[in-house]
Image (cartoon, grey):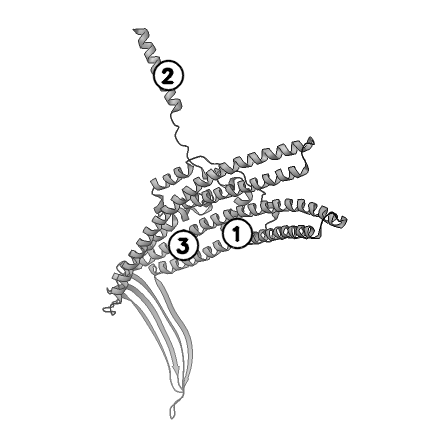
Amino acid sequence: MRQKAWVGGWLWACLLLGWSMVAPLPAQPVDPAKTLPDKELAVLNDILVQALKQSPEMLLQSAALAQAETRRMDRVSALWPSVGGEMHYAQDYLATTNSPTTAGEGFFYNFGIQQPVFHWGAVRASADMGELERKIAQKQFAEAYRQLVIVLRQQFLALIREKKLLQNQSYTMELAEREFKLNEEGYANGTLALAAFEAKRLTIEDQRLAVARTQSDWQQMKRVFMRLAGLHELSDERIPDTVSRPAWTDGQAARLAAEFQQTDGGLQVPQAEVYTYLMRQSDLDYRIAKTRLLPKFNLFAGTSLQNQTSATKSHVSQVATTDQNFGLLANWTIFDGFATRSAKLRALATKRQNALQLQNYLVVLREDISSATDQSNLAARAVALTERRREIAAGGLSYAQEEAKQGRASPASVAQAQAIFDAAELDALDKRIALYSHWSHLVGLLWADPILQNLPATYLDHGK
């Protein structure tokens, strides 16, 4: 019995051990820093970092941010006392018919201070609106940089693709030029008819035109990219010839999107926070509008001096008057033609509009995330297929080259294998770029892009 029990216990232990070995491991967290092209392309990473400070779009956003700061200061200034006054010195001469001429001079000054005391919270609400306006500008700055990063990545990858296409066309052109020289010799020797030679000439001219057009497109694309990134120069050597296959695991897009949805991340992205801040501004605007027909109280204090001397031929007089005053000033608008009612209704309507915009934005954001997730997964499948075709083409090229070394294959067969490999490699590069583009778009939507950490922390404070 003891032996059976021992055997039974050993069997259960083996089963548990086997289950633990075949049970699915917990999914590893997704690290976008390892799956974006910036990890491999250091030049792209540097450009994205520099674009934050020097691209035309971000310079415009910086100017808008500075304007928002000045408007905030204007609103906050109402909380502080206002001080002002005037002083002047004057001389005058008064001549009247049948009266002696009078000469006078005097020194005058008047200074006062006024401090809001009780405005039913309207002054504080106005200052809070200025602070929200600054935060809105910060969030819009962050959103502009996110979109800029996506576009710059796509354009830089497109430059790599265009450069690869130009290299392939140039190689094909070299082979075609060699063949055309043989055609010229054949035509000169009389072994090639005029019609056939002209057809060959037109073909080579078409190929030359295609290379020239690709070269022109390449230069134009580079100029557009430089202008968008705020670069003064970008040498051809800094643009890589290709980009490696993206690091990818099945389900990583879905896991990253699920984490975002579970943490209610949609309400924490800057654009959603902009609508939330606008709603808060509408609440403050409504609070201010409610006080328009209520009395406002200010403290005031002032001092003034009038020192005047008058002189005639027979008399001189000097008078100095000092006045000091302080008190409580009340301003009260009793009726404004229903302007207050209009202001309150406008604030409520604006809040409703912003609430609807937030609702619509969150719906569109969810749809965009779902679409970007699907497109990333489909692009990853396409990458797997084209990489396999590329491997097959690479094997065919190696075989043709080895056969040529052994004298069993002609140079033409090697050139054909090279052309097949170049086409497969370009197709693989296209699919890699498509995957990088969709993935970059997705991590940008989820605000999981590591390059966004270059933004000031206050721009990503999630509504605090």
233 displayed left or right of 307: right
Toward which corner of the image does residue 237 lie, by quadrant?
A: top right
294 displayed left or right of 107: left
**Residue 362 spot, x, y in % from top left:** 34, 48
Q: What amino acid is found at the position of numbered circle 3 in the picture? A: Ala
**Residue 50 spot, x, y in % from top left:** 52, 49
Give the structural element (helix, strand or loop) at label 2. helix
Give the structural element (helix, strand or loop) at label 1. helix
**Residue at the disc numbered 1:** 229
- Which is nearer the eye, 216 or 386? 386
For the N terminus, the image quarter is top left
**Residue at the disc numbered 2:** 14
Label 3 neighbourhood size at 10 Å, few (<14), some (14-19), many (20+)?
A: many
**Residue at the disc numbered 3:** 137
Mark 1 or mark 2: whose residue is earlier in sequence: 2
Separation of marks 2 and 3 at Cα, in angstroms: 63 Å
Tell me the residue at 46%/38% (across/down): 381
**Residue 76 spot, x, y in % from top left:** 36, 58
- Which is nearer the eye, 275 or 314? 275
Mark 3 or mark 1: whose residue is earlier in sequence: 3
